Amino acid sequence: MKVLALEYDLEPLYLCPKSLCAKENGLWEERHEENDNNLFESGCYALMVNGFSSNLYFAENVQENSHLQSALKSLPGCNFSIITTMSFTVDQSGNQTSYTEGFALLLNKDDDNKKIKENLIAHLDTNRVKFNISRIFNKGNTMWYKEYSDNDSLQQEIEVVAVKQPKCHPAYNKRETNSVYHDQARVQSVLDTFKSMNEVQELKEIYDGKMLNIKPLKRDHPIIVIEGLDATGKSTLTENLAKRLNGCARKSPQDCVLHLRKTFDSHFQLLRRAYYAIGNYAFAAQVLHDAQSGPVVCDRFWHSTAAYAIATDVKVGDETHLPPARHWVYSWPPDLLKPDIVILLTISDELRRCRLEGRNTEKTDEEIRMEKSRLFRQRIAEVYKRMDNPALVELDASGSAEELCNKAVELLSDKHIITI
């Protein structure tokens, strides 16, 4: 049986067959929020479409979905809203057995369903995009779900009801259905899937020449990582702290692949994160080498990669929609060099905005999104707090650069990372 979710800005709306909420079944708890069953009142409805296929690997399906998204944005006469969706199947015990992502066209009663569907199918066929189409609509005071079969006929109507969100976001039921990488083998597997792309070939060639055998994961001097949201003072503290400790300052991603960053940032989430993930392993090799001769202070590492991935995978809503605390997704990859300490810099949103306004650098789309979306910032901030093994140690970064460096040195001494 299939469970659906329409990802509205404030929170996802989960829908499942009414039969799954029956007393004798009780796999899902129906939610009774005001207007839950009136989202498609007065003839309004949602036309749902996704590019997933059971014949493809998850990485290939994600790519197909990105092609679908591009095609939907160029759909002629597109004067309706498009939101993201997700769906997953559950067995008779309620256990999740699959996961897919897609999109919903939110239409009103005056829209011609048949004409829009015909135009959509023709447009997607022209763009050679694979797709599946279904529909959610109101009938009386109840909501219903229909799937279109290959011959364009409607299958059986299923009554659906709004239900409370699952204990864990569906993308994190399995390790391979999200964009957080916990081992180098999966990173390489995803990159190999798209090795026909010139930028992937170049990335692999660069890192194949830089990857070192870093086992056993030992070092002679401490490795210190500085994390935090943009404009919290990471780069400044990294440089100042490295000088104070007579050590080395390093920044991820490395200079040798920065020219590829903008290209990978334009790709779909799974491939984009693979760029940063493989960079973490090459970065670890460089850091381990540096740590043989002195302390190393790093501006970002795995925690940043994972935090932005999780906050983006969980596309909507506040921190309550994240995977729960102590979930495996928050733990450091076992095959990646682990730092001695990770310091999380925190400042007020007001001060952070002031610092951002004083910058004269090009912003990434994630920086722009973080400035605009309070919920996105909340998700990232909470992910940092839930990280463990190693957990992040918070440090107030609201003072001057010198004050912050002094506090960092004191913290490292208190944690027995360094000796003053």
Image (spheres, rainbow, N blue to C red):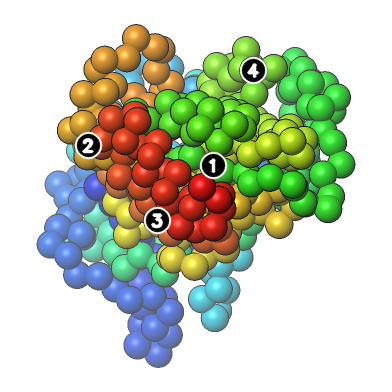
| Cα–Cα span, label 1 and label 3 | 15 Å
Residue, disc 3:
385
Residue drawn at (34%, 24%) of the image: 368
Q: Which mark is residue 255?
A: 4
Examine the image and state in which quarter residue 408 appears.
top left
Q: Amino acid at mark 4?
A: Asp
Earlier-in-chain disc, 1 versus 2 = 1
Return the residue nearer the eye: 290 or 74: 290
Residue drawn at (61%, 65%) of the image: 97
| Cα–Cα span, label 2 and label 3 | 17 Å
Earlier-in-chain disc, 2 versus 4 = 4
| Cα–Cα span, label 4 and label 1 | 18 Å
Q: Helix, strand or loop at disc 1?
A: strand
Q: Position of residue 288 (x, y in %)?
A: 74, 40
| Cα–Cα span, label 1 and label 2 | 22 Å
Is residue 80 among what the camera can see?
A: yes
Q: Which mark is residue 349?
A: 2
Residue, disc 1:
225
